[in-house]
Image (cartoon, rainbow, N blue to C red):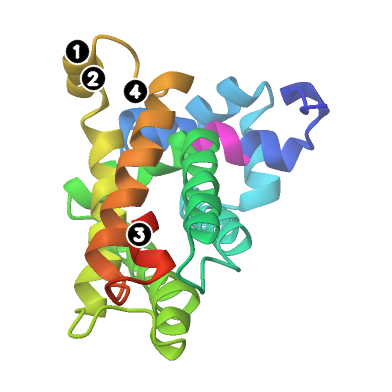
């Protein structure tokens, strides 16, 4: 059963309220009083848990990284339809459940924020170490794949969809974060990555026929 906001600890409610405010208005435009009001607590309690707004910002950044590390600890490490489908489902679920965190990151990156750049660096390291390196070690990557850019493309695609969400909604005729569009995005994007990155199967093999 999903947790209600009231079920969360005061610390988590404050952190989540800060994340929402930072994602919507930006860090500089979101005050401790704004966060306290959104979390339903006093400004003093915010300062008790986090000290300053900078401390609150650090807690938000640590949370964004932690949920990514936890979710992507075991990405696809083999070239099979089932493994890629599972990875696509994992990424799509994470994007859906953490859209506010992605909006926060996308906003920070678009504004040239150094902390947002550090978070992106961490996420890119996860993509390379937990996804691309195991595929390369298994001999599954297409020869000559640029792993730096492969990792960048994954996050640029994800962040761009969140950043341009209103425009995508208009183009698609329904919300990008609706179940139907997320499924379409999952299938199309997973197929794009698989075909672009994976070593082609030998002609005549059962795997090549399935492709």
Q: Quadrant of residue 23?
A: top left
Q: Is residue 76 above or below residue 91?
A: below
Alpha-carbon span between mark 4 and mark 1: 9 Å
Alpha-carbon span between mark 2 and mark 1: 6 Å
Q: 82 or 150: nearer the eye?
A: 82
Q: Which residue is mark 4?
A: 176
Split into 4 quadrants, where in the image is the C terminus?
A: bottom left
How many marks are shown on the rendered structure? 4
- Please name the residue shown 27% across and 63% down the image: 114
Mark linked to residue 166? 2
Q: Which residue is mark 3?
A: 209
* Residue 159, position as x, y percentages in the image: 29, 45
Tell me the mark number nearer the camera, choosing from 2 and 3.
Answer: 3
Callout 2 touching callout 1 (CB < 8 Å): yes
Alpha-carbon span between mark 3 and mark 4: 33 Å
Q: Which residues are magenta?
A: 15-19
- Please name the residue shown 39% across and 76% down the image: 132
The mark nearer the N terminus, 1 or 3, is 1
Split into 4 quadrants, where in the image is the N terminus?
A: top right
Asked whether, in this view, residue 98 is left or right of residue 197, the answer is: right
């Amino acid at each position: 059963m999903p947790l209600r906001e009231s079920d969360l600890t005061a610390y988590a409610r404050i952190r989540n309220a800060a994340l929402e405010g930072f994602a919507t208005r930006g860090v500089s435009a979101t005050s401790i009083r704004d966060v306290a009001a959104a979390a339903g607590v006093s400004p003093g309690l915010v300062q008790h848990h986090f000290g300053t707004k900078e401390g609150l910002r650090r807690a938000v950044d640590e949370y964004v990284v932690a949920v990514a590390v936890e979710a992507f600890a075991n990405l696809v490490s083999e070239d099979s339809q089932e493994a890629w489908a599972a990875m696509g489902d994992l990424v799509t679920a994470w994007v859906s459940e953490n859209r506010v965190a992605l909006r926060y990151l996308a906003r920070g990156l678009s504004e040239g924020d150094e902390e947002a750049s550090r978070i992106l660096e961490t996420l890119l390291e996860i993509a390379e170490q937990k996804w691309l390196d195991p595929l390369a070690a298994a001999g599954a990557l297409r020869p000559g794949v640029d792993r730096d850019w492969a990792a960048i493309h994954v996050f640029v695609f994800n962040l761009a969809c969140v950043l341009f969400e209103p425009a995508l909604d208009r183009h698609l005729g329904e919300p990008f974060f609706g179940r139907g569009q997320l499924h379409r995005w999952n299938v199309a994007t997973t197929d794009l990555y698989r075909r672009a990155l994976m070593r082609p199967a030998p002609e005549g093999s059962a795997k090549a026929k399935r492709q």
